[in-house]
Image: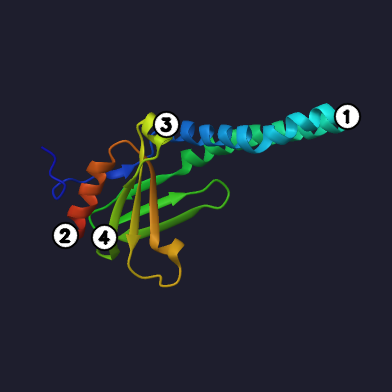
Amino acid sequence: MFDPAAATLGEVLPHRNLRSLYRIYLLIIIWVGVLPWLLPLAFVSPPEPMLLLSGGLLLLVVFIIWWIGAYCHTIRYCFTPSEIVWEQGVWFHQTGNVPYNRITNVEIFQGPISRRFGISHLKIQMAGAAGFASLSVLKIRGMTDAVMLKEYILARMKNPS
């Protein structure tokens, strides 16, 4: 049986399905946000400007697909006995640490598409950073064993080593 108080996790990476989830989000954005105006415009506009616009959009989509893979490759979470250390970022590298004694709440979020891919996200709320809501929340994305991870964090909150 898993004993969260005695376990040491070390480095945790998001599941590879996180890339697929982000690509599905991109597909939805294209389907709902781009195609409804691009297709009718293609029938009423001259071909040269439409070719330039379509080519530019295609390059943007290819770039975003590359960026999704590069971004997901940079996400890392390290669970030490006293804190969570995280890092992410392709061009703007961000790092931070969250001591377990500052954590006030841990929630698991799993939308319908995430559920299909078998991944969840943890939302960790912290004390402090008053007035800066985005600074007081750490989102751990793309976890397959979110319940076990939540139990581990809750155990560390109660029994810091």
Helix, strand or loop at mark 4? helix
Kindly identify which residue carries mark 1: 48
Q: Nearer the viewer, residue 24 or 38?
A: 38
Query: Is residue 161 visible to the viewer in this orientation of the structure?
Result: no
The tag on residue 158 is 2
Give the vertical position of 91 relative to 103 (above or below). above
Q: Is residue 73 left or right of residue 82?
A: right
At a point 39% along the width and 59% down the height, the residue shown is 137
- Check disc 4 and report the residue beneath it: 100
Instruction: Look at the numbered discs 1 and 3 and tell me whether their residues touch, using CB distance below 8 Å.
Output: no
Determine contact: label 2, label 1, CB under 8 Å: no
Decide which of tag 4 and tag 3 comes sooner along the chain.
3
Report how far apart the C-alphas of labels 4 and 3 lie in the structure.
28 Å
N-term-proximal mark, 1 vs 3 = 3
Q: How far apart are the alpha carbons under marks 2 and 1?
A: 65 Å
Where disc 3 sits, the SS reads helix
Q: Residues within 10 Å of mark 1 (few under 14, many from 20)?
A: few
Kind of residue at badge 1 = Glu
As measured in the structure, the alpha-carbon distance from the residue carrying label 4 to the one carrying label 1 is 58 Å
Q: Earlier in the sequence, mark 4 or mark 2?
A: 4
- Amino acid, disc 4: Tyr
Q: CA distance from mark 1 to mark 3?
A: 38 Å
Separation of residues labelled 4 and 2 (CA atoms): 9 Å
**Badge 3 density bin: few <14, some 14–19, many ≥20, Cα 10 Å:** some
